[in-house]
């Protein structure tokens, strides 16, 4: 034991020590092993790196002639076997054909392949041609296995392609029974038709009405085991999972031509693997996909997963008002970006775990612009039936200056205090702390206590539970009877809420953790 402590001595922090850290050192653990979960009373930890979830789909509306497309290039017609994968969800079945993925124009015999819902047969169907014609020796149409037609509002994984080795084309649904037909050709027609999602005949016909996501083009036929692995019991896979030698996805990365997550709110849908970025025709929008996936750069946030035991998971309010995930912004770590216009994440009911009379809050932030109104809210809670009950951790604007602030009201006088450091003069990311003993507030910026100014009311230390009828918990704004207002413009990372006021040793532990994790040279412990 003595030898262990001697080895650790050079890493022992100065000043008071949190008993949790002391127990780690006595157990022979490094201070670098410390996590916020080691401290008691952790009520919320929204870890952007591990907890940020996305998982969207392109929402196609047939009535608007919406589709996605990219001009012809050689990569879209592999020389030999190939396979298409896409996840689909039907909003309606009009009784006529609806296109899923096509490279198919009849005029000039530019038929290569076509995956679609056959209107009268109510079956998924796949066709392929090697010379662009519909002549029997060069073209075949094969239908998915018999049974009930596809249901509305249900996700399906479609897989279709050409297997040159056995001279067949085939189609399967959810990695199930493969329907095949004999077509002894060497490759699909290398024609000039565009690659389209949701339409055919160069964006002129049979528009899809529903959702598509996680589409892939492979330059080889897939095995049954690979299709089963891709389906993943209905949850699907992303291309980041391909190429792992320990599972049935081992070969997929090496044969992948293009992969489209389709998680963008609108506009171009990026090809994560190749160069076939899809142009948005007539505004394909966003809807939820079959499952959540880890967030990637610029993706909208569908959910933030709470790493505490409270399971408080803020969700997007709508696709057009969701903040985005920004990877590698500080010390290789991500942040969540709020646009100051409408971006928020919300828990629809006030979580009991944070509804306490005292506590400590930590958050890393960077302000991109002055609040558009008197204040912008980092996080807080409000009564959605009024404007007179709230608890808000915010940035308060004073003409051309801005300061960290705490505001609380319970159908009485607004109590607001602000800090002493003008945020307008700061650059980069900063650690903000907000503490309440239940009788007084404290604000700390980068490890230094702020001198507090009472803006209105008094500094009584009121915390979440001192406001009644709180309906929600919101990141990036305030939701009360006037709507979603007081929006934050900037970045946030790792907001943490503890259901008890931290003493200085615990605060030091948290500062060290933030400083180490984000390389915050300006933070004083």
Image: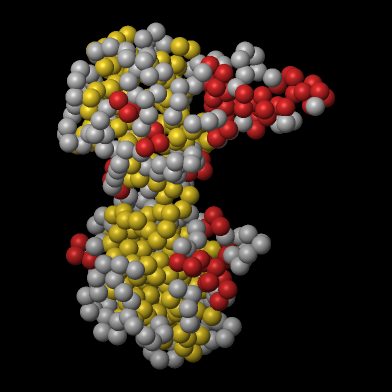
Tell me: residue 199, above or below residue 479: below
The residue under the point 37% across, 14% down is: 440
Asked whether residue 490 is in view, the answer is: no
Quadrant into which the C terminus falls:
top right
Query: Is residue 215 or residue 65 the one in the foreground?
Result: 215
| Any part of residue 399 in sight | yes
Indicate the position of residue 471 as horizontal and vertical percent values: 26, 38
Residue sitting at 29 percent across and 38 percent down? 472
Q: Position of residue 184 (x, y in %)?
A: 52, 88
Residue most extreme to the right: 3
Q: What colour scheme has been applied to the protein in the rendered image? A: secondary structure
Q: Position of residue 1 (x, y in %)?
A: 80, 27
Q: Please say if 224 is above or below 329.
A: below
Report the number of discs: 0
Q: Nearer the viewer, residue 244 or 438?
A: 438
Q: Is residue 132 above or below residue 275?
A: below
Residue at 30%, 43% in the rendered image: 348
Residue most extreme to the bottom: 136
Q: Looking at the image, which residue is at 42% across and 58% down?
A: 291
Give the percent coordinates (x, y) of residue 451: 39, 8
Depth order, front residue of 298/513 = 513
461 or 298: which is nearer to us? 461
On screen, residue 523 versus residue 287, left or right, reads right
Give the image quarter of residue 377.
top left
Residue 201 vs 493, above or below: the answer is: below
Quadrant assignment, res 400: top left
Q: Is residue 66 left or right of residue 421?
A: left
């Amino acid at each position: 034991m003595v030898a262990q402590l001697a080895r650790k001595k050079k890493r022992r922090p100065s000043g008071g020590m949190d008993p949790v850290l002391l127990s780690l050192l006595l157990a022979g653990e490094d201070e670098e092993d410390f996590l916020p979960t080691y401290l008691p009373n952790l009520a919320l930890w929204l870890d952007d790196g591990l907890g940020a979830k996305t998982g969207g789909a392109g929402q196609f509306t047939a009535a608007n002639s919406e589709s996605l497309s990219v001009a012809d290039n050689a990569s879209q017609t592999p020389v030999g076997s190939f396979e298409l994968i896409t996840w689909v969800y039907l909003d309606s079945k009009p009784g006529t054909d609806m296109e899923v993925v096509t490279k198919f124009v009849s005029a000039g015999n530019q038929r290569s392949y076509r995956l679609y819902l056959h209107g009268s047969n109510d079956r998924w169907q796949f066709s392929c041609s090697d010379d662009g014609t519909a002549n029997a020796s060069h073209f075949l149409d094969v239908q998915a296995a018999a049974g009930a037609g596809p249901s509305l509002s249900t996700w399906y994984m479609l897989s279709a392609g050409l297997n040159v080795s056995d001279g067949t084309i085939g189609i399967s649904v959810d990695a199930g029974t493969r329907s095949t037909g004999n077509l002894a050709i060497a490759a699909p027609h290398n024609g000039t038709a565009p690659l389209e999602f949701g339409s055919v005949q160069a964006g002129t016909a049979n528009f899809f009405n529903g959702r598509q996501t996680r589409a892939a083009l492979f330059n080889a036929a897939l095995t049954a085991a690979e299709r089963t692995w891709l389906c993943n019991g209905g949850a699907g896979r992303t291309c980041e999972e391909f190429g792992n030698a320990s599972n049935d996805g081992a070969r997929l990365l090496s044969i992948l031509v293009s992969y489209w997550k389709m998680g963008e709110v609108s506009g171009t849908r990026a090809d994560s693997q190749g160069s076939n970025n899809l142009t948005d025709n007539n505004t394909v929008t966003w809807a939820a996909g079959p499952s959540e996936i880890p967030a990637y750069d610029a993706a909208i946030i569908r959910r933030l997963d709470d790493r505490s035991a409270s399971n408080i998971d803020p969700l997007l309010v709508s696709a057009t008002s969701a903040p985005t995930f920004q990877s590698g912004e500080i010390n290789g770590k991500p942040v969540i970006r709020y646009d100051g216009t409408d971006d928020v994440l919300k828990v629809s009911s006030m979580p009991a775990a944070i509804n306490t009379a005292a506590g400590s809050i930590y958050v890393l932030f960077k302000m991109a612009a002055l609040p558009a109104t008197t204040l912008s809210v980092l996080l807080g809670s409000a009564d959605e039936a009024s404007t007179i009950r709230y608890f808000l951790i915010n940035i308060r604007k004073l003409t051309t200056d801005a300061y960290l602030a705490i505001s609380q009201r319970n159908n009485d006088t607004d109590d607001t205090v602000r800090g002493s450091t003008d945020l307008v003069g700061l650059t980069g990311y900063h650690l903000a702390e907000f503490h309440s003993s239940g009788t007084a507030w404290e604000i700390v910026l980068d490890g230094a206590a702020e001198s507090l100014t009472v803006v209105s009311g008094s500094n009584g230390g009121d915390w979440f539970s001192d406001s009644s009828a709180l309906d929600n918990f919101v990141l990036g704004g305030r939701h009360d009877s006037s709507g979603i207002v007081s929006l934050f413009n900037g970045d946030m990372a790792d907001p943490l809420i503890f259901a008890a006021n931290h003493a200085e040793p615990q605060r030091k532990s948290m500062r060290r953790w933030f400083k180490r994790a984000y390389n915050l040279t300006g933070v004083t412990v």
